[in-house]
Every structure is written in C-alpha cells, then in structure tokens.
Amino acid sequence: MDKNVPPSRLGSLQTRLSGLAGTLRVAAGLVRSGRPIDLAGLQEQVGVLCAQALDLPHGEGRAAIPALDALGSELAGLEAALRDNAPGAG
C-alpha cells in the first residue's frame, strides 16, 4: 500500500469505531471486576463518530453500519455492567 495515499474516510471511521468499541469492552471488564472507570468524554466521542458517519456518502455510510452496530453492542454491554455492578445491585 502506498503510504502517500490518505486513508479513506470510511476506513478511518471504521478504525476509530473499532478502537472505541475495544475501549468500551475493556471498561465493561473493569466494572465487572469492581474497578472504577472514567466516562468523561464518552458522549462527545460517540457524537463525533456518529456525525462523521452521517457525513459519508450514502454507499459508504451504509458500509459503516456493521461497525456502528458493534459499537452499540459494546455500549449496551457497558451499560449492563454498570447496572449490574452498581452499589446495591443484585
């Protein structure tokens, strides 16, 4: 691959979505093990990535759906971990 060719907007977005999904997976694991996490900036990061997805041309935007779905699944997993491990839960 030619290093002088900039990455596609879709490829860059998918990489960032995958990275954030991994971060959320780690955060959920930390919560489940009783460790505190810092959610500062999460809403902004997700908002920026969603805006970038909306800015893609239609065909590329549709191609981003699996990565967006994966991010949503990791968010749901973190939500469940936070709920299940909240003080007084279960």
Image: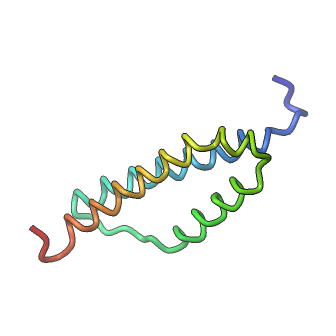
> Image quadrant of residue 90?
bottom left
Can you give x and y, in whole percent of width and height, for residue 61 in the image?
A: 70, 45
Q: Residue at x 66, y 42 (%)?
A: 62
Could you say which quadrant of the image residue 60 lies in?
top right
Give the residue at x 28% y 60%: 80
The percent position of residue 15, horizontal first and vertical second, equals 63, 42
Q: Judge whether 7 appears above or below 45 on screen.
A: above
Rendered position, 49 above or below 68: below
Direction front: furthest residue: 58
As rendered, which of 22 and 70 lies closer to the eye? 70
Tell me which corner region of the image, top left, top right, bottom left or bottom right, holds residue 78. bottom left
| Residue plotted at (90% across, 33% down) | 4
49 or 39: which is nearer to us?
49
Q: Nearer the viewer, residue 50 or 34?
A: 50
Pinpoint residue 89: horizontal percent, then vertical percent.
13, 71
Compared across the picture, whether 45 is left or right of 78 comes to right
Residue extending farthest to the top is 1
The foreground one among 80 and 61 is: 61
